[in-house]
Amino acid sequence: MARNEIRPIVKLRSTAGTGFTYVTRKNRRNDPDRMVLRKYDPVVRRHVEFKEDR
């Protein structure tokens, strides 16, 4: 079974400027805009916003 384009793989890049990324999948039907999540950045050792980078 082929991977579906409804749930593409996206990179979440830190807004702290460290270059740290998370890799996840998202549902395009529920989240058509770019994702912004607040996650832990181990480089600066605190929670910051991560924005979707395609």
Image: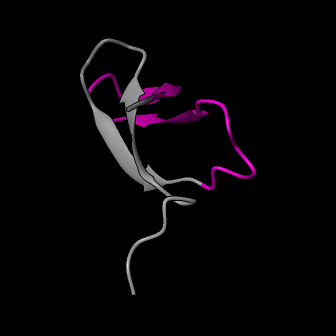
Q: Nearer the viewer, residue 9 or 4?
A: 4
20 relative position to 8: left or right: left
Highlighted magenta segment, given as a residue range: 27-52
Residue found 40% across the figure and 72% down from its top: 3
Q: Residue furthest right?
A: 30
Which residue is rendered at x = 24% and y = 23% of the image? 19
Image quarter in which the N terminus is found: bottom left
- 32 sits to left or right of 4: right
Depth check: give the residue in front, 11 or 15: 11
Say if 14 sits above or below 11 in the image: above
Q: Determine the residue located farthest toward the top in the rendered image.
A: 17
For the point 75% across and 51% down, the residue is: 30
Q: Height in image: 17 above or below 36? A: above
Question: At 39% across and 24% down in the image, what residue appears?
Answer: 14
On the rendered structure, is 14 left or right of 4? Answer: left
Image quadrant containing the C terminus? top left
Q: Is residue 13 magenta?
A: no
- The image shows residue 50, relative to residue 29, as above or below, that is above
Q: Nearer the viewer, residue 49 or 35?
A: 35
User: Picture coordinates of residue 32 (x, y %)?
Assistant: 68, 39
Total numbered labels: 0
Where is residue 12 drawn, in percent x and y? 41, 35
Furthest-bottom residue in this view: 1
Q: Tell me where residue 34 appears, x and y as whole percent.
A: 59, 30
Residue 35 in the magenta stretch? The answer is yes
User: Which color scheme is applied?
Assistant: one colour
- The residue nearer to you, when weighing 45 against 49, is 49
Quarter of the rendering containing residue 43: top left
